[in-house]
Structure formats: C-alpha cells, structure tokens
Amino acid sequence: MMGLEQILAFMLLGLGYGALIAGLATGMVVTFRSSGVINIAAGATAAYSAYTYSELRTTGVLALPIPIPLTADRQPLDTLPALLVGLVLAAVLGLAQYLLVYRPLASAGPLAKIVASSGVLLTVQAVIVLRWGADPVAAPAVLPQESVALLGVTIPADRLLLAGLVIAVTALLWALYRHTRFGIATRAAADNMKGSVLLGLSTTRLEAANWVIAGVLGGLFGMLAAPTTQLQPVAFTLLVVPVLTAALLGGFSSLGVTVATAFGLGMVNSLIALFQGQPWFPQAEGGPLPGLTELVPFLVLAVVLYLRGRTLPDRLTALAPSMPRAPRPRHAGPAAVIGTVVVVAALAGLPFDWRQALINSMLGALLCLSVVVTTGFVGQISFAQMAVAGAAGYITAAAGTDAGLPFPLPPIAGIAAAVITSLVFSVPARRVRGLQLAVLTLAGGVAAQRFWFGNPQWGSGLRPANVEPIAVFGMEISPSRSFWGMEPPTSGFGLVVFAVLLLCALLVVWIRRSALGARMLAVRSSEAAAAAAGVNVGGVKTAAFAIGGLLAGAAGVLYGYNFAGVSADRFGPLTSIAFFGVAVLGGVGTVSGALVGGLLVAQGLLFHAVTTWFGIAPDYQPLFAGLAVILTVIGSPNGVAVSLADAARTLRGATRRRRTPRRAAAMGES
C-alpha cells in the first residue's frame, strides 16, 4: 500500500525532471518573446551541451567539428572548468542559431520559422548521433548526490538544488525583463518591432542577446539535470513536448506560470512511475500500460487550448508575413502521362536497389501530399501526419493479420482509421491555428506513438505488427514476390504504389482548382475575411483534415505493405517533423512540390544516388536533410518546385525578349 510519505517522496523526486523542463521552457519563452520563434530544437541543443560536458568530464575533449583536447593525454577535465566550457559553447550555439538561421527570417511567417527550427532540430540530433551514437549515456553528476531528509522523507540533494536554482533564475529573469533597460527594450520590441526601430532600438542586438540567454539556460539545466534523466538523443529531444506544454500554458509570457506548470508536469511524471507498480494500475500483457506520461501533456494542451482559443501573443511587423505560394496547377494531364511513362520505364529497367528507392520516394510524396492539403492550402501547421499514417498501418495489420479479413477490407479499414484520427486533430484546429496547433499536434504525435503504437495490447509494443500482402484473384502482389522475373523489390508492387500516388495527386490538383480549394486558400489568407465572405471556416478546416487523413492513410497502408509490417519507431514525431520539413523544402503549396519532397526523403532516390555515387554513408542522411531544410527555408521559402518553375518561366521570358529584336531586324532587312 502507498502511504502519504511515499507519494510525497516521489513528488519531490519529480523536481529534477521538472527543473529540466522549467529551464528549457523559460529559454523558449525568452526566444519567442524576443524574436517570435518557438524553438522546438531546445531539447536537442540542451542535449548537445550535456553530451559535451559528459565528454569533457571523461576524456577532456571539446566536441566540435574538429575535436579539441583540452587536457594532456585525454585526462578528464575538472567539474567547474567543464561546466564553464559547456556554458560558453551553449551561448555560442544560441547566438549562431539566431545569426545564421532566424535573423534572415526576421520578417518571415510562423511556418518558415518553425520549419527552420525543425531543420535545426534534425541537424543537431544528427550531429549528436554521429558523434556519440544513439544509445543512452550515463551523464556525470555536477551537483552533490548525497541524500537529505525533508518533510519526513529522504531524497537526493540534487533535486532540491535544481528546484532552488530554477526558482532563483526565474526571479532574476523576471527582474531583468521588468526593471532593467534591456528588459524594457526587449518587451517593447516584442510588442511593436517597427515602433522600436523608429525609437532607435537595435532589435538585432536585443534578439541576439536573448538567444544567448536562452542558450545558456538550456545548456545549464541540460548539464545539471542530465544525471536525473536519460541522456539519449531521442529522449532528450522529445523533452520539447512537456517544455512546450509549460511555455504554452504560461502564454509564452509568464515565467512564473511556466515554471509552476513545469514542476507540476515533473511531479505528475514521477507519480505515474510510482503508480505503475500498484496492482490497480492498468496493465498490458503483464506490464504497466505504457505512454501515460506522454498522454498527459497532450490532454492538458488539448483541453486548455480548446477552452482558451487563439491567445498566443503575436509580434507586430511592418507587413503581414505570407505563406508559401500555392499556384493553380497547369498541364496536369500531360504531366500525368509523361510521369506514367517515366515511372513504368524506371520500374521495368532499374536495378532492384534503385526500384526500392523509387518506391520509397513515391511513398514519401504521398505523405507530402497530405501536408500540401492541410498546410499548403489551409495553413494549418500539423506535425501529426505520421501519427495519422501509423493509425492506418496498425489498423490494416489488425484487420488483415489478426481478424483475417480479405483484401481490400484491411486497407479500407486502415484509411478510415486515418481519417478518423485526423478528424480528432481537426477538433482543436477549429479553435486554434498556426504555432499553437503545431505544438498540440506534436504532443499528439508523441502520445500516439507511445500510448497507441507502443502499446502491446492495441499496438505492437516493441515488436513489429505483421501486415498480410495484397492478394487479388489468388495472385500476391508484394515487394518480396517476383514479378516479370525480377528480383524483389518487384515492379508489380511499385506499379500499385504509383497508381495510388497518381490518383491522389490528381485528387489534390482537382481540389486546388475547385471551389473548395478557393475556400481553403481564403481561410489560409484570413479566417476573419473568409468568414465575413460567407465561408464556413470550421467546415473547410474539417474537410482539409479529412482529405489530409485520407492521403496520409494511403501512405501508411502502403508503407505497411512495403515492409510487411509496422512498428512504433517508424511512425514517431521526429519522423513526422522530418517529413513536414521535406514537404516545405519541396514546395508545400503545390503537387509538384510534394513530388520533389518525395525525391528528398530519407532512403529516397536522391539520397540513394548520393550514397551510391559518392560513397557517403547513409548515417549522414539526417544531417544533410536538416541542413537542406534550413537552407531552403532561408533561400527559397516557396520551395524547390516553385523556385524552379519561376526560374524556367523567367528563362523563357528572357529568351522571347532576345528573339523579338532579332525577328524585327530580320523583317526590316527583308
């Protein structure tokens, strides 16, 4: 039986986790209030500082692109020097992010900034994995580890010290932003940037200083709190969900509410760990039900955001930032014919590894099409596309393998489940949009992966769920079966994937040309203006999420058939962030952009060509993807496809202008 002392002890133990969340969340509030950026890479950059400190304390090597030994014979560096070096590196990392990524996007909209932040996340995590690997690392302690007695219970001293340090830092930040000239100038620039510039304030210096402060906060608490949690790239990166929960409930303005929420989440997380050992706790195959610690932030966010509506403060700029262009598709019929010829020829003539890369690209393009509808047409920033696709994959596996339903019932059930899952995310989208919806769907993606897909009772747990192959009239169409005498992956399954992609692409083209597409773009441009013009804004959003769910569901079903199974780690939120970034990279407002995005996905055609022709290891794919997302958002915010189309149009216009004088001269001579 649990006693009050045991409950109190676990609540106090949660102070360490809560302090880590609070430290990162206060830094996120600082960056948002100063530059309008929701830094979803905060957990990854804090992890980099923690890994750096760990290596300094073990080998004395400073982890830079070129490692620098700071001690003779790689002896461990002392605690205080290692901590100071880690803080300096965290400050430099924060400043570099601002100057290289976010300063060029100062006048860009929320979509560009959050996509750039996702690119930073992918890049930093890729660097961590390449340098230190993906396995957990035991972080050396910074704070004292002895136990102390408090309120009748014994807990490690570092938890209390972390909590006290967070409270002290929060009080200092409150005083800094409330009573100093720097803080008043920062708040003035956040409220009205144009007016602050007219008053002579240097907004660039203010934002740079605030990014340094945020970097130091993340690095400090990352290094101090790492021994209290698991120092592992994905686990640390996904801390962004409770961090965003705390910052959002604080309105990205109130440091006190943010820190209090963070401590509350830390205590709830610790209490769930306590309750999991109790006989009344829900069980799944003999073990405690997983995913509740990830489900809690999502439920809290969903309820609070739905009740609040759109309350996130906006920074005033001289001009309203625009979304990427979504031009009306032209020549869809000829393009479909040419694409069919090219793909059929490629599936028939390419070697097996290139065929698999082509299939992966087509699956990626299909998922990018769902982002085109929800984000490119309606402007809803959703990071839940992989959760929607995963729902389709798991229901297809359950209907075909467990229930034994014949084809085509399993994929129909899977796509229906994807549409329903997407519609669940559309409910809060009727009340919130933009960055708030991005935060909510990211939390929902984490909850779906852990609570649904990772659950052995109604998901697959740690093992994959088998997907029965397509069987039509006794003929099996599967990547593992021969077709026309070809070795797997066969062109037969590739033709099925292409047929689905072609139909879905034509569907999106029709939507863009239809009255529904016009209403979607009106909602994207201005919900208030669209409503005033008689557009049912909520209905348009619901339709967009339903169509996006259908497209993502088709991708999830085919993904399961492609790999003969589905697993929780393949439908994670980081994969969803990567796909979202690739869709924006290709061109989130166009069908051609989705096709370009498919070429750029991991294990797709482009990366297969790079790794094959240049001998670059596949481990570098996430690094290149993250850098490509950042560079594209900065240099070509409309995406590669739209930029190439614009360049081709400009070239044709220049060619016509050159030819016109020549023709006129020739006619004059004649």
Image: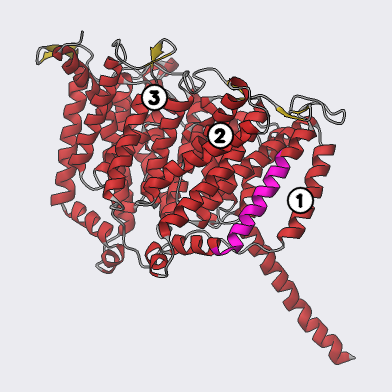
Q: Amino acid at mark 2?
A: Ala
- Judging depth in this view, the residue of 505 and 213 nearest the camera is 505
- Could you say which disc has been placed on residue 392 in the image? 2
**What residue appears at the point 41 percent right and 51 percent down from the top-left corner?**
102
Give the SS element for disc 2.
helix
Span of residues in magenta: 497-515
The answer to whether marks 3 and 2 mark residues whose Cβ atoms lie closer than 8 Å is no
In the image: residue 350, left or right of residue 502:
right
Instruction: Give the residue displayed 49% in from the left and 31% down from the top.
Output: 572
Q: Which residue is mark 3?
A: 291
Name the image colouring: secondary structure
335 versus 364 height, above or below: below
Q: Which residue in the rendered view is the most extreme toward the left?
A: 151
Q: Earlier in the sequence, mark 3 or mark 2?
A: 3
Which percent across, then down, holds residue 170? 18, 38
Question: Spatial distance from mark 3 to mark 1, Cα to Cα?
Answer: 43 Å
Name the front one of labels 2 and 1.
Answer: 2
Task: Give the Cα separation between the discs numbered 3 and 2.
Answer: 19 Å
The residue type indicated by label 1 comes to: Gly
**Badge number at residue 339:** 1
